[in-house]
Amino acid sequence: MAEAFGWGALGASGLLIGSVLDGIPESFVLGLTVLQGGVSVSLLAAVALSNLPEGMSSSSGLRQAGWPRNQVVAMWSVVVLVSGTAAAAGYGMLGPASGRTGALVQAFAAGALLAMLADTLLPQAYAVEGVLTGSLVVTGFAVSLALSAV
């Protein structure tokens, strides 16, 4: 089943690249929210709600494909380290004094996330959940909109 999801070496590389491309802009924006007076609860919840299931599913698939636990942990440690560095950079580079905004970074993050969703996560979700996939995606999107409106 793991090979059906492309969890071989190439699939894992794509997952790592997608996670980093998604995590860097998210972390930049998270660092920017600290500059604006505190961490945005809705942004933090959205990052957690999107990344935890993604990481758990991906890790499970990699383990089923024969990846050793320490290699999976090392891969995610790299993502966390790069994302933490990006949050610090966002804090330092995107402040109001710099004249830069996070709009371009957010647009890049959205594109990276959509690409990873379309290429990897939605096909895997459809293989597991079938016709419920669309309804579950829309429900998750509605919850994220509700959180951002708070």
Image (tube, helix red, strand yellow):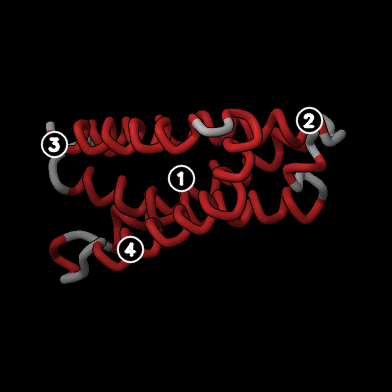
Q: Which sits in the foreground, 74 or 108?
A: 108
- Give the number of the mark in front: 2 or 1: 2
Q: Which sits in the foreground, 69 or 145?
A: 145
Residue at the spot of label 2: 63
Q: Position of residue 69 (x, y in %)?
A: 78, 28
**Element type at mark 3:** helix
Residue at the spot of label 1: 84
Q: Position of residue 105 (x, y in %)?
A: 33, 63
Task: Answer left or right for 95 relative to 77.
Answer: left
Residue at the spot of label 4: 107
**Element type at mark 1:** helix
Residue at the spot of label 3: 149
Residue farthest along the front direction in this orientation: 131
Q: Residues within 10 Å of mark 3 (few under 14, many from 20)?
A: few
Residue drawn 24% across the image and 34% down it: 42
Task: Give the alpha-carbon distance from disc 2 to disc 1, as whole Å.
Answer: 25 Å
Which of disc 3 and disc 4 is earlier in sequence? 4
